[in-house]
């Protein structure tokens, strides 16, 4: 049984707490929070854009620390799960790795490629595992894509279009600050950048066009150029000022023998979805049954991957830190292309 300490009890810390309750062979035995109210178990102030709101939590048998340093010093803990604001990821991860812990770090791994490189190197030198919480591949629609690629179900992968958008997150005052949260590319598009990197490999270059808000790219349309000339891959990431659609994601992914299509929209007056469809070369429209789509279950599957990687001492193909590092590199190349209006070599 892996003993886990969660660093940071905000929205993601709460979602991870819920997911660990359903994860086999892992148990949260400690938390760290600067907030004495949260250390007492009152998490009712926590809100997010999916899942249940925070509740009163029974912390009986769970050590409640004031700092990451205290959490890391707890010799009983096997894994430190970092759910802190992005600007604090690097210091917390390095401290935990230096103490000999395995580490799970919520995405983005860090705000800069240089910090990602430091963290990857520290993990390789420590012998501990550094896994990065890129949960998107564990959502059922994206997992279906992964399985189709691995099995070669529809022949060669040829390309895809990826979309992700949110309304302006008025509740997150530092969202556009490149030194605290990172802005739409690093905080939002990084999901698709990671997935693109994972299934297609690393592009040679990107060309992006978009709009800026201060120093951050608010809207970004990108073409990814690969050595494999058969690939045609693009993405759109945007923050819109209208509050009527808090969230949207989707894709259309092309294979030799099929196209996979999916889109989900969360509107202010309710959710609308284009469920996953498989459009086959012989004219069929297949509609796979994927379950209820509970987003917390995606985190359960993600954390189960963490448990397997640590207990079996095998690097995860999905959550490994080098993939997460490459996703951050892609986001910064896209930002550079928007600001210079030129292609950028990756």
Image: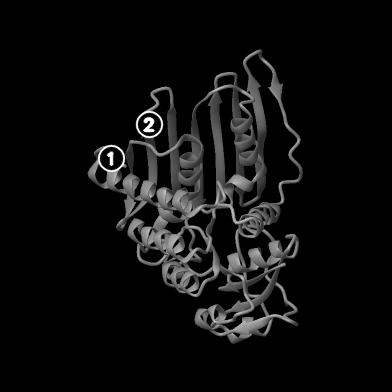
Q: In which quadrant of the rendered view does residue 64 lie?
A: bottom right
- Taking the image as drawn, is residue 315 in sight? yes
Place of residue 178 in the rendered image (x, y in percent of width and height, measured from the top left): 35, 62
189 or 213, which is in the foreground? Answer: 189
237 or 23, which is in the foreground? Answer: 23
312 or 218, which is in the foreground? Answer: 312
Look at the picture and state if 26 lies above or below 189: below
Q: Is residue 25 left or right of residue 332?
A: right
Q: How is the image coloured?
A: one colour
Name the residue carrying label 1. Answer: 345
Looking at the figure, which quarter contains the N terminus? bottom right
**First in sequence: mark 1 or mark 2?**
2
Name the residue carrying label 2. Answer: 226
111 or 270, which is in the foreground? Answer: 111
Number of dots carrying numbers: 2
Taking the spot 61% from the left edge, 55% from the top edge, the residue there is: 309
Callout 1 secondary element: strand
Taking the spot 60% from the left edge, 58% from the top edge, the residue there is: 49
Q: Is residue 231 left or right of residue 310?
A: left
Callout 2 secondary element: loop
Place of residue 73 in the rendered image (x, y in percent of width and height, measured from the top left): 54, 82
Place of residue 145 in the rendered image (x, y in percent of width and height, measured from the top left): 61, 35
Look at the picture and state if 148 lies above or below 93: above
Say few, some or many: other residues with alpha carbon within 10 Å of mark 2 (under 14 / 14 to 19 / 20 or more). some
- Taking the image as drawn, is residue 245 in sight? no
Place of residue 229 in the rendered image (x, y in percent of width and height, measured from the top left): 38, 23
Taking the spot 52% from the left edge, 71% from the top edge, the residue there is: 100
Taking the spot 51% from the left edge, 42% from the top edge, the residue there is: 195
């Amino acid at each position: 049984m892996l003993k886990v300490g969660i660093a940071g009890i905000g929205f993601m810390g709460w979602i991870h707490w819920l997911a660990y309750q359903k994860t086999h062979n892992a148990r949260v035995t400690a938390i760290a929070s600067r907030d004495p109210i949260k250390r007492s178990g009152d998490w009712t102030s926590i809100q997010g854009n999916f899942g249940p709101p925070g509740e009163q939590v029974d912390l009986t048998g769970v050590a409640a620390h004031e700092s990451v340093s205290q959490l890391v010093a707890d010799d009983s803990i096997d894994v430190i799960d970092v759910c802190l604001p992005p600007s604090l990821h690097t210091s917390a991860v390095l401290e935990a790795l230096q103490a000999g812990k395995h580490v799970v770090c919520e995405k983005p791994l860090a705000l800069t490629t240089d910090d990602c490189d430091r963290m990857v190197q520290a993990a390789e030198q420590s012998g501990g595992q550094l896994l990065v919480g890129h949960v998107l591949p564990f959502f059922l629609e994206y997992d279906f894509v992964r399985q189709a690629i691995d099995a070669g179900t529809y022949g060669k992968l040829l390309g895809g279009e990826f979309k992700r958008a949110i309304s302006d997150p008025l509740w997150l005052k530092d969202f556009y600050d490149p030194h605290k949260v990172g802005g739409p590319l690093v905080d939002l598009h990084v999901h698709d950048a990671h997935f693109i990197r994972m299934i297609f490999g690393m592009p040679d270059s990107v060309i992006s066009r978009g709009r800026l808000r201060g120093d951050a790219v608010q809207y970004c349309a990108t073409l990814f150029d690969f050595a494999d000339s058969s690939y045609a891959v693009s993405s759109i990431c945007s923050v819109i000022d209208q509050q009527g659609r808090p969230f949207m994601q989707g894709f259309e992914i092309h294979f030799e023998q099929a196209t996979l299509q999916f889109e989900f929209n969360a509107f202010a007056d309710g959710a609308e979805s284009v469920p996953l469809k498989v459009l086959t070369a012989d004219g069929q429209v297949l509609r796979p049954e994927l379950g209820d789509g509970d987003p917390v279950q995606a985190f359960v599957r993600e954390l189960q991957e963490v448990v397997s990687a640590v207990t079996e001492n095998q690097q995860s193909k999905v959550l490994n830190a080098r993939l997460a590092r490459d996703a951050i590199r892609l986001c910064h190349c896209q930002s550079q292309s928007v600001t210079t209006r030129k292609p950028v070599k990756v």
